[in-house]
Amino acid sequence: MPSLSSRLTLPVFFLAVLAIFCLIAPNFASAGNFENLMAGYAFIGILAIGQSFPILLRGIDLSVGAILALVGMCIFDLSLMFGVPGWAILPLALLVGTLAGVVNGLMVTVLRLSPFIATLASLAAYRGLVYAISGRQLVPELSTKPITDRWITGFETYFDLTRVLGLKGVVKLPWVPLSFLILLGTLLVFHVLLAHTRFGRDLYAIGGNPEAARLAGIKVGRLTVAAYAISGLCAAIAAILLVARLTTSTEGLGEGIELTAIAAAVIGGFSLTGGTGRLLGSVIGTFLLGIVLIGLTQMGISPFVQQILTGLILLVAVGNDRLQTLRADRQRARALGEVPA
Amino acid sequence: MTGLMTRAAPHALTLCVIAFVMILAVLEPAFLSGSNLIGILRAVSLVGIMALGMTFVIMTGGIDLSVGPVSAIAGLVAYFALVAGHGLVAALLAGAGLGLLIGIANGLLVASLGLPAIIVTLGTLSIVRGSALLLGGPDLHGIRDQAAYSFIGSGAIYGIPVPVVIFLVLAAMAWLLQSRTPFGTLVAAVGDNERAAWLSGLNVTAIKAATYGLCGLLAAIAGMIQSSQVHTASATYGKFGTELDVIAAVVLGGTQLSGGAGSVARTLLGVLFLGLLNNGMNILNLSIDIQLIAKGAIIALALSLAARRTG
């Protein structure tokens, strides 16, 4: 278990960055800006939560962007081409994403592919499938028609926090998007699952040492498939939120988003060597990236510089993670008397 | 039957390539025409050149995701050097040198700090792409009146396109380096058991930095050939997905992502396999969506067969 101080590093760093941008970036500390931040990064946070599961098992899921697009296109087709009502579309969408994740998991366990290669192959295949089923190409006149089903567009709702709390006239709080609340709900459910159930403990065990976990009687194969299924499920939730926001879907939806999700999870403390990390970290990691990018935009800094800084943040985060590991190793060695103190 | 399977397994990819050629030749006689075969080589030359360097990196147990942006920035730097009137040699050296430097930086971050290669090169991917965009903006820069530079991408020697010639020469050099020099053995030793290599006195950091440097250099060369081929340089070239094609070619050739085993010759087979796959699907007039699905499925299938063999 990581020490309290190493657990607090990320939240403290997050708050420091937040404070700095509130001070130096014009209009950063405004209600509207926090609305944008919450609405624009909630779905990425959900992807990062999903991505955390394969990474916890020393794997990776490169296909989340393609799954996102696949689910998005399914919603588009079902709603606009077939006129399926929204309440029926939602469970189907979640099912499609979960199945796509299960296929990834089976490739890793049954076909024994390395997760990197398996999800690389499925990235190509799922993206191809998106083009194949694209209602935009099958029925071209639909491509300008927005999705209007209330069950789907309803996800793009904002709640007036100021009025709910009865603070009208006292302070102006940002309106909270429903997508952000769904992010919190997803976080809560999967956090409980990971931190307080046998299932979660087994996942940590597999990530720490798959062979030892297998010998201890843990069903490694089944749990690995479950981890990739959760990643797919989260991609489906993210797809619903994104389609609701855009009121449409495109073939290129979510291209390259897997990199942001992976970066968020790694910044959040999920080590690629498996076995460590907490989901709250992934969500904080997501919003850390979000704050930096939105803050820099408001300071009028070129998006190209932002890209450079995103890369640097990633390097610093992984460097810091490495430093912590080394320090922990040294402490352990000292405790065992292997090196003089 | 199993005996035959076991004996045939190491040659599975070779057999696949041969079977592929025969099927395509029957389905479409034009496939075997000289111009189509040259066309295949020309189409794979850029990915092939990058795959040569990637082979060494993957042999050490690492990976380089930054090859796409590196190729873009090299083409861009060569363009700016040409426009500034520094001449062809200086332009090529500038582009290649930059690629080499970025590669070495990757290698040092991975080797001396012990950071995971996936994340480091994901970070440099972002940094290099941002720098390229900062340098050249998102627009295309037309390369005009540079006959010598254009020859690299569009010229031909005895009817063979120059990119193919460069690819074959570099492939021969990489093959020699990997199979006939101590360097190849050292790289495999590091990938096989890094700690053992370090304990036996090898300079693991230098070896790793060299492989990433080589990978960056070759990516830069590919990028300059591309910019010369299409007569434009742009920061957006080598778009996301390039590195995936390159890595797919290397692992299809049997180089293990966990490091150790690997060979440039087999990478060339992997490159050829992907080239045939793309060409065959184009000849058969399959739409892009079917092509993507088929490619993903075939790569997954081929690799799982390989995993059964070794596992």
Image: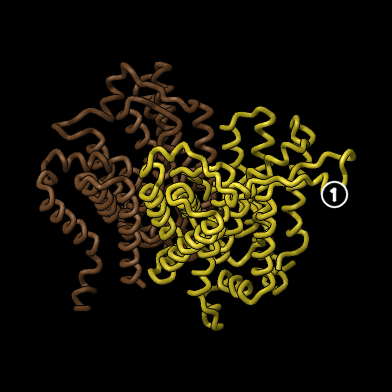
Q: Chain of mark 1?
A: A
The N terminus of chain A appears in which quarter of the rendering? bottom right
Which residue is found at the position 17% from the left and 35% from the top? B160
Q: Residue furthest right?
A: A170
Chain coloured brown in this rendering: B
The amino acid marked with disc number 1 is Leu
x and y percent of residue A124 in the render? 39, 52
Q: Secondary structure at mark 1?
A: loop
Relative to B67, say whether A328 is above or below: below
- Chain A image colour: yellow
The C terminus of chain A appears in which quarter of the rendering? bottom right
Which residue is found at the position 51% from the left and 75% from the top? A220
**Mark 1: few, some, or many residues within 10 Å (few <14, many ≥20)?**
few
Left or right position of A172 against A328: right
Q: Of A226 and A313, which appears nearest the observer?
A: A226
Which residue is found at the position 63% from the left and 49% from the top? A155
Left or right position of A160 against A321: right
Q: Of A245 and B155, which appears nearest the observer?
A: A245
x and y percent of residue A221 in the render? 48, 74
x and y percent of residue B288 in the render? 31, 45
Where residue A327 sits, quadrant-wise, is bottom right
Q: Of A95 and A267, which appears nearest the observer?
A: A95
Which residue is under mark 1? Answer: A165
Which residue is found at the position 77% from the left and 50% from the top? A12
Relative to A85, say whether B149 is above or below: above
